[in-house]
Amino acid sequence: MLPEIDFAGLLWIFVAASVVNNFTLSYFLGLCPFLGVSGRIETALRMGMANIFVLLVTSLCASLLNTFVLPHAPYLRLLAFIVVIASTVQFVEMAIKKLSPALFRALGIFLPLITTNCAILGLALFQTNKQYGFIEGIVFALGAGCGLTLALVLMAGIREENELATIPEALKGAAMSFLVAGILSMAFMGFAGLFSATS
Amino acid sequence: MASEQPTYEELIKGLWRENPVFIQLLGLCPALAVTNSAINALAMGAATTFVLVGSSLLVSSLRSLIPKQVRITTFIIVIATFVTVADFTLQALAPVVHKELGAFIALIVVNCLILGRQEAFASRHSQRPALADALGMSLGFSFALFLLGAIREILGSGSLFGVSLFGPDFEPWVIMILPPGGFITLGLLLGVFAWFKEHRERASQQAALDTGERRAA
């Protein structure tokens, strides 16, 4: 069943999704949690974990839909993604609540909220556009999730420091967060060199 | 016409006082992702307007039929249907723009602005105020997108709508049309707005203080 796995290719997919084309910092996906819960490092980390989890479930659903359902009805793509992903996450959430209350507490309220996060639908769509297969999809989701977590944690760290800094009155709050995100995004652009250096 | 006044009020509040992007910070993902040129920003604004107005009208017409427990799911399905229509229409009419915007047209589904308006407004009001609210909000959204897109295109490519503005001597700030430019432009714009607001508040406080002193003297 399993075809030969191209590990170098998978590694590139992971690196590309996590740092070079970071979902938050270069596609602007998942900005709401990025600005909303990046106040403290610990919260940011938990949010990131929950995100990785939902992204994996999403990738799985999207692969299945792409293989079995959507070839017959391509115009249902958006509807199918949204409805199937939302209900699967809800279902998995109930299962976790029963099976592992500790894990459920760790992921917490974030799980249901993440479903309407644009990063989730974005992952499903990008995966379809790039025609990733099952395994590539999983790796892509893992990379995207790690990238999101990295961005969240970095942002939270900077914001914790920023609370003690003197910031002009007008820039306090959202404006400062955007400027910081801009500089972070600029730093991440450096990773684009990874690709041009090798190809 | 007693109902004229409130409808008008619903229409204009989205333009500035409750502007979705600059004041409520909603729908940021498309607001930053596709605003690397003015034309892309306008196309995104038009698509969002179509989806928001269409779903607001439909949701407000069906609001007595939608069971409360499944309302969010219903809204999402209505929105996703309109987005699918917009996606295919744009693909047929303007394939170049559709290619530029890529997956972001489809991502209108998860624009929190649209779902937010359905939940907060359209599902509680009749068609006319819902239409006014949707139009106002989407105009405000398009205006914000256009402002961001125009600033980024002028600085980043030295042109507006593809027409060169400064001649060949202009060195474009390439960073502005890349992702960091989006964050920085929005951050600075928010800062400028906050600064103006603070200024105006201080001026009005000063004016109140002055009249108080004059009265005391």
Image: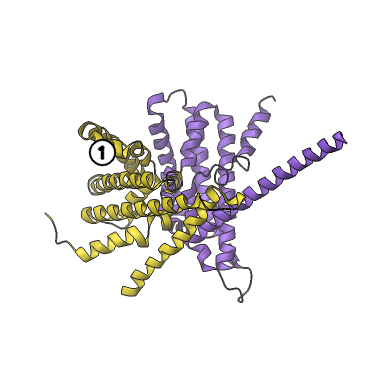
Chain colours: A yellow, B purple
**Quarter of the rendering occupied by the N terminus of chain B:** top right
View extreme (left): residue:
A1
Q: Can the viewer see residue B214? A: yes
Question: Which of these two is toward me, B215 or B23?
Answer: B215
View extreme (right): residue:
B217
Q: Can the viewer see residue B35? A: no
Where B101 sits versus A118, above or below? below
Taking the image as shown, residue B3 lies to the left or right of residue B111, namely right
Question: Which of these two is toward me, B177 or B211?
Answer: B211
The chain to which mark 1 is attached is: A
Q: Position of residue A76 (x, y in %)?
A: 34, 43
What residue appears at the point 32 percent right and 51 percent down from the top-left corner? A145
Q: Position of residue A8 (x, y in %)?
A: 22, 66
Question: Which of these two is toward me, B95 or B15?
Answer: B15
Residue wearing tag 1: A103
Judging from the image, what secondary structure is the residue with disc 1 in? Answer: helix
What residue appears at the point 51 percent right and 66 percent down from the top-left corner? B175
Disc 1 residue type (three-letter): Leu
Q: Position of residue B168 (x, y in %)?
A: 60, 76
What residue appears at the point 65 percent right and 34 percent down from the top-left corner? B9
View extreme (bottom): residue:
B169
Q: Position of residue A109 (x, y in %)?
A: 35, 36
Where A187 sits versus A47, above or below? below
